[in-house]
Amino acid sequence: MLKTATKNARIAANEFAENAGIKVGSIRTARQGNFSITDAGQEYGDLYKIEKDIRVVTSIEFYLTE
């Protein structure tokens, strides 16, 4: 999950950088925030439910290059 969050952060950073005419470099800082797993859908608390919603909050700062 953390790998996916980091990958998605780089994709988003590349979109911003491309619009600004610059490139994304290496990671400057990374912080792990909230990480939660809850039952999917409307029926919370069902112990036998397999489907889950997972939320990972990761803040990543990248160096920018020209």
Image (cartoon, rainbow, N blue to C red):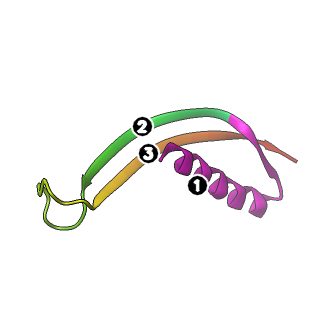
Q: Amino acid at mark 3?
A: Val
At x 24%, y 52%, the residue is 38
Labels 3 & 2 near each other (Cβ < 8 A): yes
* Residue 26 belongs to magenta span: yes
Along the viewing direction, whichever of 41 and 57 lies nearer the viewer? 41
Tell me which segment is drawn in magenta. 1-27
Secondary structure mostly taken by the magenta-highlighted segment of the chain? helix
**Where does residue 59 sit, x and y in percent of width and height?**
53, 41
* Residue 7 belongs to magenta span: yes
At x 37%, y 51%, the residue is 55
**Where does residue 30 sit, x and y in percent of width and height?**
57, 34
Mark closest to the chain's N terminus, 1 or 2: 1
Would residue 27 be found to the left or right of residue 18 on screen? left
**Where does residue 29 sit, x and y in percent of width and height?**
62, 32
Cα separation between marks 1 and 2: 15 Å
Cα separation between marks 3 and 1: 11 Å
Q: Which mark is residue 33?
A: 2
Q: Amino acid at mark 2?
A: Gly
Farthest-out residue, bottom? 42
Q: For mark 3, what is the residue?
A: 57
